Amino acid sequence: MRPTLAIIIPCLNEESALPLLLKEVENAVCTVQERCLVVVVDDGSSDTTAERALAYAPASEMLSVEVLTLPYTMGHQEAIYQGLLFASTTTAERFVVMDGDGEDDPAALPAMLADREASIVFVGRGARSESAGFKLGYALYRVLFRLVSGRSINFGNYALIDRRVLGAVLDNGFVHFAAFLSKQRVSTTTIISDRRKRLGGTSKMGFDDLSLHAFRSLIEYSDRLLVLFLKAFLYLSVIFLLSVLTIVGIKLFTPLAIPGWASNLSATMFNSLLLCLGFFVIGLMLSRNDQQRVRAGQHLYKRLERTP
């Protein structure tokens, strides 16, 4: 089969959810009559995720399943990258990334595939099924992301891209797929789909994971962060210089006493200057290292063969 669509599903210990998700994906794809290749990327699972994916037998000839395994648990984003890298070797012209726990609803696929003009189709998140604390943390993350990047983010990995965007993804690499896509200057559109509960298993996204997720998204905008720290350094430098000149002027040209808080304030501002400068220098070094992605283009996956 020569697929025109590839769906990449990164998985980590999703033996209970994955078979149900594959069936839903098959049903959704059959409604649009498009030849589809599902690429399941097992991110070093300790359960039977890979075996369950390999055992899945599509009822439709419009869909086939390939299973890749990574040498060890390399992380969700690397699993996405490796899946896209494999899919790039096929005849597919469009590529969908979705999570393997079933929270990304396959019912949104027909609407995504219906748009033939946009280079990226984002799936904006509607209602969520997480706890109130998680929702609050996610809302704060969105505010922080907007302050740093100047852009809104109401979507996750669930998105469709064309070959043009895929080329940028594979050439540059990423640490946060959704944030990387938000930077692309191509035609985009967004559809809304509610975030479902997991089809099985337990959630792997806790508060610490959400914090790391947010940090990775900001790395994609490291240049903007550097600009913010540089601006802060320049503004504080001007304020610090004016404060010092004011204190010296009062000391030399007036009989007024210098209040103790003025010296403390000057010392605090000087320390803030050093912190901003330090963050700026460290940011430059990290940005340089990030741009020299070692793994970009490397095939780290192993393709599993079905036994006759």
Image: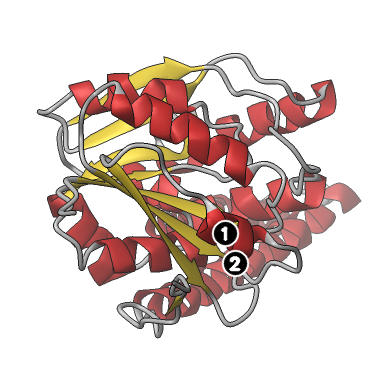
Colour theme: secondary structure
Question: In the picture, which quadrant includes the C terminus?
Answer: bottom left
Q: Give coordinates of residue 89: x percent, y percent.
A: 20, 68
Report the residue that reaches farthest toward the left. Answer: 117
Number of marks in the image? 2
Viewer-nearest residue: 233 or 52:
52
Identify the amino acid type marked 1: His
Q: Give coordinates of residue 101: x percent, y percent.
A: 63, 41
Which comes before the other along the chain, label 2 or label 1? 2
Q: Give coordinates of residue 106: x percent, y percent.
A: 46, 28
Relative placement, left or right, of 137 versus 180 is: right
Residue at the spot 63% in from the left edge and 36% down from the top edge: 141
Q: Is residue 137 above or below residue 233?
A: above
Identify the amino acid type marked 2: Asp
Viewer-nearest residue: 246 or 204:
204
Residue 91 sits in quarter? bottom left
Residue at the spot 27% in from the left edge and 67% down from the top edge: 170
Which mark, by number, is residue 152?
A: none
**Label 1 element class:** helix
User: Mark 2 packing: few (<14 Cα in 10 Å), some, or many (20+)?
Assistant: many
**Residue 188 seen from this side:** yes
**Residue 238 seen from this side:** no
What is the C-alpha distance between the residues marked 2 and 1? 7 Å
For label 1, the residue is 76
Which mark, by number, is residue 43?
A: 2
Q: Give coordinates of residue 36: x percent, y percent.
A: 27, 44
Relative placement, left or right, of 104 versus 44 is: left
